[in-house]
Image (tube, grey):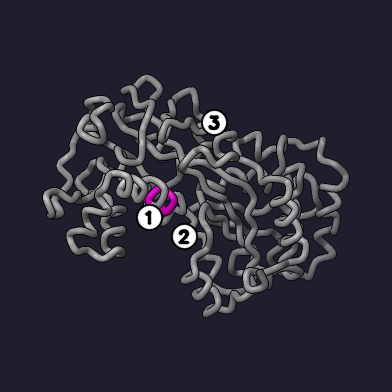
Amino acid sequence: MSFAKLTASTLAIAAVSASAAVAQSRTNVQVSGSSTVLPYASIVAEAFGENTDFPTPVVEGGGSSAGLARFCEGVGENTIDVANASRAIRDSEIETCAANGVTDIIEVRFGYDGIVFASQIDGPEFTAFNQVEWYEALAAQLPVDGEMVDNPNTSWAEVGEGNLPDVEILTFIPGTRHGTREVFEENVLLVGCEESGALQAMLDMGMSEDDAEGACIDVRADGASVDIDGDYTETLARISSNPNGVGVFGLSFYENNTDSLKVATMGGVAPSTETIASGEYPVSRPLFFYVKAAHIGVIPGVKEYAQFFMADEIAGPGGPLSNYGLVPLPEGEMDEVQATVENETTLSEM
């Protein structure tokens, strides 16, 4: 991969040679976390290694929660420098970090992505979904006549207004360690529960709001929904071997696999960079990476990697990340994030 057109200002971001950094036995930046962020970080890492004096960073997946857990293990060359996440870091994770000496965390929001619902390109006509249909298809229990009963729906034709194909319900959704799962629960299952009237029905039954919302996002475990703990390539493999299956993907992954997948609208809106940027598409989220400030100036290239990642030529419109499928930050928001990186502004200072 070549980025010969990178401007002088971009390259100047990381012009400090690796030899000028504080000597350490580890000389490359180590990154881990979100499967959604993995391809973006890999693109940046390769370009960073090719265009600077620093070694190419080591980038691994594993999920947002797993990456943040590694990030919070402590400070030192045996711990990672950067955690990728498709959700914001939780207060409980910040507390765990602090307990292990990771007190200065720089949050970098670098763009937006959508969550899409796709199936085999020549499979059943899954072309239009709404949140109510997904809630009624996947909820572990549903309120019926004042009682909670196990979900009786086995066909997509039985949910919502009955507009979907008469095909068995079989979905492949992100496992609980993935940041995408949290967005799926909040923006799809919980919204569908509310719009269907089920949430109010549970409250009318005497359930607390917390218990009712928990029931809204509690997914059935009878085989109709399968958690995918790997990355989107595993979901794609499941779809390939299950013609009736529907999978949850990131928009960028889908756009790079349109030869085998077709995507459905959600709530009447087709997913695209335009509908995500405008906020019209209902299932989108910001993407993040977190930098361990204590490693800046100690592990060579940590700050320079973050600066390189957020350069206009990399993360902005027309750059390699937007070409892969990232929805770039608006100009004013990009300026703010770039200043956060340059000034090493930590969460506690924001």
**N-terminal of the two: label 3 or label 1?**
1
* Amino acid type shown at disc 3: Asn
Quarter where residue 209 is shown: bottom left
Q: Residue at x 81, y 36 (%)?
A: 4
Percent from the top left, x then y, of residue 336?
A: 72, 56
* Amino acid type shown at disc 1: Thr
**N-terminal of the two: label 2 or label 3?**
2
Q: Which mark is residue 286?
A: none
Tell whether label 2 touches label 1 (CB within 8 Å).
yes
* Amino acid type shown at disc 2: Ser
Percent from the top left, x then y, of residue 60?
A: 55, 52
* Residue, far right: 8
Q: Is residue 124 above or below residue 316?
A: above
The residue under label 3 is 256
Foreground pick, 308 / 350:
350
- Image quarter where the N terminus lies is top right
Q: Is residue 287 left or right of residue 266?
A: right
Q: Residue at x 27, y 26 (%)?
A: 163
The residue under label 1 is 176
Asked whether 102 falls inside the magenta stretch, the response is: no
Label 3 crowding class (10 Å Cα cut-off): few <14, some 14-19, many 20+? few
